[in-house]
Image (spheres, grey):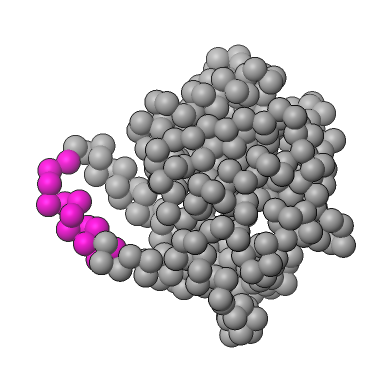
Amino acid sequence: MVRRDNTIKTALGLGQEHLCCCCCINRHYILDLLPEVSVVGSLLRQGFDIFATDWGTPSSYDKDLTIGHFVNSYMDRSVDLIREITKSDKISLFGYCWGGNLVLMYAALHPDKVKNVITVATPGDFSVDDTLLSIWTKDMKVDTLLNAFGNVPSALLNAAFALRNPVEYSHKYPHFFEQPHSLESVMEFLATETWLYDSPPIVGEIYREFVKYCYQQNLFIRNKMMLDGVLVNLRNINMPFLNVIAQRDDLVPYCSSIALNNVVGSTDKSIIEFKSGHVGMIIGQRAHREVWAKVGDWLRERS
C-alpha cells in the first residue's frame, strides 16, 4: 500500500521530484514521527512530492511471501502507481535500513523506472558486520525458528533488541525522567518508544532469505543473490546514488554501509556521513538541521 502526503507540495506549488520512501522491519511512520523531526516533512518543505510504503501487518497467510514477491510485485506496482499519478517516467527511491536493501534490489532489476536511489543506514557487506545482533543472526537456525512461528513475532524482535544491552535498557526510563525535560522532549521520547514497540511481525520467508542470503552467505554485496530466478547485480544500478551513513550506528556498522559505494554501478555516487546512531539519523534535531537539507540539495541538483 502507498500513502501520499501532498499537502505542503500543493500549498507551495512545488513538487519537482517524486520520492518513494521504503522501510521494512519497523513501521514507516518513523520517517514522519513528529512535525519538528519529520524526514517526510523536511523533504516536503523543500518541494519534493513524497509517497511512503506501508506494508501493513502480515498474517499467517503471508508467511511464504518472498523478497522477490515484495520487490517485483508489491514495490513494482507501487512504483507504477506513483508514475501514473505523477505522470513521470521515473521516480526516486529512498530506503531506510533493510528498506535500503529493497530499493537497491529494485533499482538493479528495474533501472528503467528509477531516477535516483537514496539509502540511509543500510547494510551492505554483512561479512564485516560484527554488531551483537548480526553475530546472533549469523549463527541462527532460522528454519527451526520459522517452523515454530511461521512469521517472526514482534515480541521476539523487541526482546532481541533489548538484550543487546539489557542494563542500559532497564535504566532507560529512570535515566530519562530523573532530569526535568521540556514538553517537546518528553513527547519526542514517548513517540519514539511507541514506534519502537509498534513492530509488526516479519514475514517468515522474507526473514529466512535475508538471514541466509545476506547475513550468513553475504550474497547481496557479492552480486550473487537471486530473486525469482533472476540475479540481483548491483552493477546494473546506473542512476545517481546517495548513501547516508550514521557513523555511530550500533545496528549497521559504518564499514558495512560504505561498502555499497564500491559495488553499485553508478558513476554518480555520493556519501553523507553524520555522527549519530541508527535512529538518531532519522529523528535527531541536529540531523534535521544538518543532514536532510543536504539530501534535498542532492536531489535538487539531479532533478
Up-down relation of residue 54 to residue 245 (above or below): below
Which residues, given as a range, are shown in magenta?
169-181
Q: x, y (%) of residue 222?
A: 74, 55
Q: x, y (%) of residue 199?
A: 48, 61
Q: Nearer the viewer, residue 247 or 199?
A: 247
Residue displayed at 68% across by 67% down: 217
Residue displayed at 67% across by 31% down: 269
Left or right: where 7 falls relative to 112: left
Determine the residue located farthest toward the top in the rendered image: 13
Dominant SS in magenta = helix
Q: x, y (%) of residue 89?
A: 82, 28
Judge whether residue 194 can be spotted in this image.
yes
Q: Name the image quarter holding residue 171.
A: bottom left
Q: Nearer the viewer, residue 217 or 97?
A: 217
Up-down relation of residue 268 to residue 137 (above or below): above
Judge whether residue 68 can be spotted in this image.
no
Left or right: where 183 falls relative to 54: left
Residue displayed at 64% across by 69% down: 216
Residue 179 inside the magenta-drawn segment = yes
Which quarter of the rendered picture does the C terminus lie within?
A: top right
Residue displayed at 39% across by 26% down: 289
Q: x, y (%) of residue 85?
A: 75, 31
Q: Name the image quarter holding residue 227.
A: bottom right
Left or right: where 45 falls relative to 193: right
